[in-house]
Image: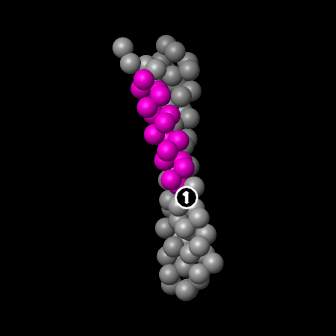
Amino acid sequence: MGEHTVASFDEDLEQISQLIRDMGDLARSMVSGSTKALLNSDNALAQRVVSDDAIMDARQRELDDRAITLIAKRQP
């Protein structure tokens, strides 16, 4: 990403980008886990995937809050 005149804006964007990457990693893990749970009839693994969904939901709310705050702080 290009640098902006306000360093805190770049920091905020990087935090949002990192959160998106983390969510992508978690989603990949959830898909893999759910596939294995289904193929192996592994109820414990399926429950971990369901638990991870709550984590994903929390990260989505955090992402929404950060993005809205960033837009609100930087609007002209």
Q: Which of 35 and 59 is in front in this view?
A: 59
Residue 70: say if magenta: yes
- The reply to whether residue 69 is in sight is yes
Query: Mark 1 belongs to which amino acid?
Result: Ala
Identify which residue is drawn at 54% across, 50% down. Answer: 58
Q: Position of residue 32 (x, y in %)?
A: 52, 70
Residue 25: say if magenta: no
Q: Residue 47's image quarter?
A: bottom right
Indicate whether 73 appears above or below 27.
above
Residue that badge 1 annotates: 54
Q: Residue 33's image quarter?
A: bottom right
Indicate whether 59 appears above or below 44.
above
**What is the span of residues highlighted in magenta in the rendered image?**
56-72
Q: Is the magenta stretch mostly helix, strand or loop?
A: helix
As drawn, the residue found furthest toward the right would be 44
Indicate whether 70 appears above or below 41.
above
Q: Which of 59 and 7 is in front in this view?
A: 59
Q: Which of 63 and 32 is in front in this view?
A: 63
Q: Where is residue 17 in the image (x, y as percent from the top left)?
A: 50, 39
- The reply to whether residue 26 is in sight is no
Indicate whether 67 appears above or below 73.
below
Q: How crowded is mark 1: few (under 14 residues within 10 Å), some or many (20 or more)?
A: few
